Amino acid sequence: MSDHEPVGGRDSSSKLIRSTPSEYGSTSQTRRVYVASFALDGLTCATCVNAVRGAVESLEGVERETVDVRLLPDATLTLQYDGDRLNDDDIAEEIEDIGFGAVLSSKHELGRDLERGSTEERTKTLYITTEDQCGVMSALLTLDGVDSVEYSKQQQGSANDDKSNVEAGFLRTVQNLLDKVFGRAGTQGYAPVSSPSPANGSGTLEVTYHPSQTGVRSIVDFVTSITSQPVQAWDSMSYQMKQKKIEARRQHEITAWRDQLLFATAFALPVFVTSMILMKIPASHSYLRRIAFFGINREELVCWALATPVQFISGGRFYRESYHSVKNGKLGMSFLIAMGTTAAYLYSIAAVAYNAISRCCGCSRPVLMQSFESSSLLITFVLLGKYLEALAKNRTSKAVSALADLAPDSATLVGTFDETSKSSSSEPERIIPLSLLQKNDILLVRPGEKVPTDGVVKSGSTTIDESMLTGESMPVIKIEGDKLIGGTINLQGSVNMVVEELGEDTALAQVIQLIETAQSSKANIQEVADSIAAVFTPFVIAAALTTYCVWAILLNCGPLDEIKDTWPYRRQGFNDWTLPLLFAISVLVIACPCALGLATPTAVMVGTGLGARLGILIRGGEPLESSKDLTCVVFDKTGTLTRGEMAVQDILLLSDRLAVEMHDEKSRCGSEMSDIDTVRDARRVATANMFYYAACAEQGSEHPIATAILSKARDYGIGNGLDRPLDEVDGFEADAGKGVKCTVNNTAVHLGNRRCLAANDVNISPGTFDAMEYLENKGQTAVVISINGTSEAVVGLIDYAKEEAALTVNVLQHVLGIQVFMLTGDNVRTANAVARDVGITATNVVADVLPSEKILFVKKLRQEGERVAMVGDGVNDSPALAEADVGIAIGSGTQIAHEAAGIVLVNSKLTDLLVAIDLSRTIYSRIRLNFYWALGYNSLAIPVAAGLFYPLTHTALPPYIAAFAMALSSISVLVSSLSLNSYEAPTFGEKKYGRDARKGQFGLDSLVYKASSGKQFNISIQCDAMQNNKPCLCQPETCECAPSGEHRVASQVDSSNFPGCHGQWGQQCKCDPCRCAGCSSCNSKS
């Protein structure tokens, strides 16, 4: 019976009980498009992957560009298909026809606009298992938000029927949680549901619903209210459910290989003992040599009888896979094993028959040695290799499993939040399974508990350990309105949170998806491995046939007659025809295409999982491969090298008019004003008045300049709720690219740049433009504040460089030998100031560029032969990120930037860029090691197995030893990849900073860098002239050289200058009379 059996049609509400998606019809404005994922069974190498991909892409209705077949970390198929022309049963049957298992793991529906071709998610799917299936189905169709109901066998969830018992444990856990929620005493065991049967009413329902209209808990509460039967519910798209299914399949695979290995060993070991040990003991030798019947002795009979179950029961899967591989024209490792074991088994039967006929006829022909131990041990060692390989593969995928385990199984529900009315309603506290959460639920998170899902703090405050996602060990303080990430740990206070994201939409699920995508992607070297694997099996077969023919010709046509009699093969039971057969069988079984296929993906899996633990998300093999050869790193400035937050740095007062609150017009020229305290008071009052007008004008704005001015105003007690609250403004106007203007208490206020001054006919106070240029030369953004039509102050704002920016830039340049460039839309002076702070030379600074020009610069570098990495954080960086060989996004940046990047630095720490590059190089080095080992193993093993050295050693490689070597080759590749877990990230040792004037923030003098290899680098920051033992040639006001004795950094604005004094911006004092305290200009005059 089909998974979707028709039991009805449309009701008055136009809801569906449907059997297949085709009942939707094609006359609608949209068609049914599904995204489905299948668990696959039986895939071992790239040949299997290509076979499944080719079969699925041949189906009518499958969107070929969406077909993704993964071998690791788990064999899965993901695709989109047209539900009007195809269903999931058709896909599974097509895969089964080529010899592999396939069971639907998850499916959800997309809405596709037929005219525009766009897609967006419309509905979600919930699976409900209950005994009262028919009654529940009818009732569900009356529930608002439910789109359709189908019969389903989704709970089986694996590629083998017997795997349902593994799934049963998980589903039983879900039922136990549900029983606790709804107050049932005791639980009922879960039994896998057979084919849906409306007659007995039992089975699983697939409920499609609109998440904007209803939720999982509403549906489950409704079902439990209408039936007394136990209810099980789960969402197949939930990442927790997916990971539990994957873990169940992994454990099943390990158990299956173990059981097959034990069965084969139970028969193969006695065969080995009989042939290789007992036949060497005189007493047992004479017993086993006795004839049993028809000329067959006891040794041959026992070995034959014991080897047969191994050959056809344990080796049966290799025959089945070989049949399908021949049928599909894609030969793989199973075919080689089947050929080798069959040849050894049939040869042994022929040898037994030959010996029996010779004995019955009384002939004195030499006895041929049977090789039943070779065929049985060969299969046993292959199974041993598969078992060990399954164990190792399970370890390589632990990174994703560990992330999935971070989410708790349940949550404490205390109410719901209404987004429309912005009100909340409480309800009795209860613990519910995570799968029953809905958006806008209010949850209680106590100290020590994990945050159940993504949301926002509604009330309370606490500290959260976010190290699982960011790698940062320092807890993060969370107050009302702050975001919470599911899976993080609440350390101190209890908080109420409102649920915002669920399931696959959470940050944790997206990280898991990103890692899975990265682990399944291919590096270019994998393409080489796949191309070799595609022709590997035919090559090995040809090599085996060539080996047999060459040896047969050499032994039977005379070339070796003079020396072959000295060889021991005749005494060992071989002749001139069977010895070549031994060599040919060994060639068949020693070759291992699986080692080639595992070389790249296992290293990528382990490496990307390791990167995730370090807070570095690497999107697969291509960024890894590109990162190893980087010659240039291009940084965006704002938000990447700098903090992305403007702050007021210098304040230059152009007159004393704003200080009139302290002194009347007559006292302003008195000599008493030269007292230092009085000067400081005048500056304080004038500055406070200036910030009052500026803050009133900028209140309510979210512009970075406005935020900086409002923040600085609060330092002077200016702001709502402070000593001097802000007043309302009239006539507010914002002119993009110029500034703002308004009226505050009948006082005209203008804030802006030179264009603002010109556009509003502002009276320019003496020194205004000199002050602006002074600040701009220091890398600050100059903003002129004008009061009543006259410029009164110039405020310098700066976006400080990040503390780790200088560390990163200098290690890139001095240790890794990578050129560093900076791109920015800011002006040249500001860009150069930031570049000096972090150590980028002026020639590598590109300023005043538009987003479209950023991509042109990256493209230009690539055309010049450079391997370019672009580091950015904003939407305007996305085109350049996509154009670069490697796009690297800062974790705090926009989602678009993340999607365009190949590497994401989750912690937003620039030093993680160094770790990312070092880790990428380490992973790729391990990929090459694995690849060369696998290639080298096969290149050396095949000649040895073919008997190339037999004339020298007089020793032939037994087929079972060849099989053991083949198994070890795959295992060695896996162990090599797993050794990446011992990786230690680069670290920084002692760091020395510059002079006091720089407050130890950006004046990096020297640093110690220790690479992951253990090598230590001592880096001294100097200008080019000083590196050549010459005097410092830097400009005095911008000198950054650590040991320079020629210069010192210019000091900040002197607070002893009276408001309006030109000495504030580095010129001679022009006050007349002078009112500055301790004025050097006046002292020189006297």
Image: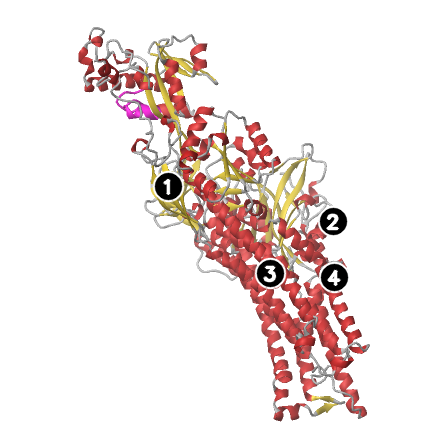
Identify the mark nearer the N-term, 2 or 4: 2
Nearest to the eye among marks 2 and 4: give it.
Answer: 4
Q: Answer whether residue 137 is magenta in the image.
A: no
Picture coordinates of residue 218, whole percent (x, y): 50, 44
Q: Amino acid at mark 3?
A: Trp
What is the spatial separation of the Cα atoms under label 2 and label 4, in whole angstroms? 25 Å
Callout 4–callout 3 Cβ contact below 8 Å = no
Looking at the image, tell me whether mark 3 or mark 1 is earlier in sequence order.
3
Three-letter code for the amino acid on which mark 1 is drawn:
Ser
Q: Quadrant of the N terminus?
A: bottom right
Task: Read off the residue under disc 4.
Answer: 538
864 and 920: which one is in front? 864
Residue type indicated by callout 4: Pro
**Dot 1: what SS?**
strand
Q: Are marks 3 and 2 in contact (CB under 8 Å)?
A: no
Tell me the tag on residue 933: 3
What's the CA distance linking mark 4 and mark 3?
A: 21 Å
N-terminal of the two: label 1 or label 4? 4
Q: Is residue 475 left or right of residue 626?
A: left
Which secondary structure class fits the magenta region best?
loop
Residues packed near mark 3 inside 10 Å, few (<14), some (14 to 19) or many (20 plus) = some
Q: Answer with the quarter of the image where residue 726 lies.
A: top left
Magenta residues, as a range? 710-726
Residue 130 can be seen, yes or no: no
Q: Which label sits on residue 58?
A: 2
The percent position of residue 756, horizontal first and vertical second, equals: 44, 13
- Local crowd size for mark 1, using a 10 Å CA cut-off: few (<14), some (14–19), many (≥20): some
**Residue at 60% across / 63% down in the picture?**
970
Separation of marks 3 and 2 at Cα, in angstroms: 36 Å
Disc assigned to residue 1006: 1
Residue 534 image point, x, y percent: 71, 56
